[in-house]
Amino acid sequence: MAAKRLRIGVLLGGRSAEHEVSLLSATNVMAALDPAKYDAVLIFVTREGQWQLSHFKDGALATPSDGTQLCLAPGGHGRMLAIPAKGAPHDLPAIEYGVPVPHACMARTARWLVRVGRS
């Protein structure tokens, strides 16, 4: 029987001048994760501060321009809400751990958001 994969949220991007550096760091994080052990949810923070669902395929991060926005429920024990561009909002499976990858001042905020969401 296969072991349950740990569901983690990888928060990347952000509003800082080091947005691109964060994307490179997140690419390295994703490349290092064993997909047999981890189910990673990529939370792409745009330069405007929107949280969007992204994915990692063939060694590259997708850079969403439109699409599904994400909301981490404060005190929701990792619960997230997906808000598609078209259609009704819906719950996503909760993340068990967060990996904040933003750089500069956003990194402190990202760590705090991960803690608040897990409370």
Image (cartoon, helix red, strand yellow):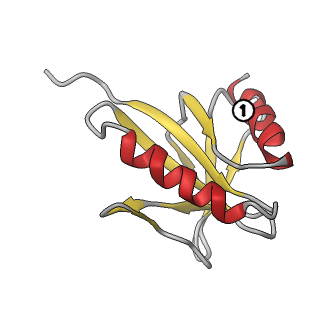
Q: Is residue 44 visible?
A: no
**72 or 8, which is in the foreground?**
8
Question: In the rendered image of this protein, does residue 85 appear above or below residue 118?
Answer: below
Q: Would residue 114 appear left or right of 43 to someone viewing this image? A: right
Task: Identify residue type, mark 1.
Answer: Gly
Residue 35 at x, y = what percent?
A: 30, 40
Q: Is residue 101 visible?
A: yes
Q: Would residue 99 appear left or right of 56 to someone viewing this image? A: right
Question: Which structural element holds mark 1?
Answer: helix
User: Quadrant of the image for the N terminus?
Assistant: top left
- Callout 1 environment at 10 Å: few (<14), some (14 to 19), or many (20+)? many
Which residue is drawn at the image coordinates 70% and 49% (left, top)?
102
Question: Which residue ends up furthest to the left in the rendered image?
Answer: 1
Residue 55 at x, y = what percent?
A: 45, 60
**38 or 84, which is in the foreground?**
38
| Residue at the spot of label 1 | 117
Task: Report the label total.
Answer: 1
Which residue is drawn at the image coordinates 56% and 44% (left, top)?
10
Residue 61 at x, y = what percent?
A: 46, 64
**100 or 24, which is in the foreground?**
24
Which residue is drawn at the image coordinates 71% and 62% (left, top)?
19
Question: In the rendered image of this protein, does residue 7 appear above or below residue 70?
Answer: above
User: Quadrant of the image for the C terminus?
Assistant: top right
Q: Would residue 56 appear left or right of 71 to someone viewing this image? A: left
- Can you tell which quarter of the image residue 110 is in? top right
Residue 33 at x, y = what percent?
A: 38, 39
Which residue is drawn at the image coordinates 63% and 53% (left, top)?
12
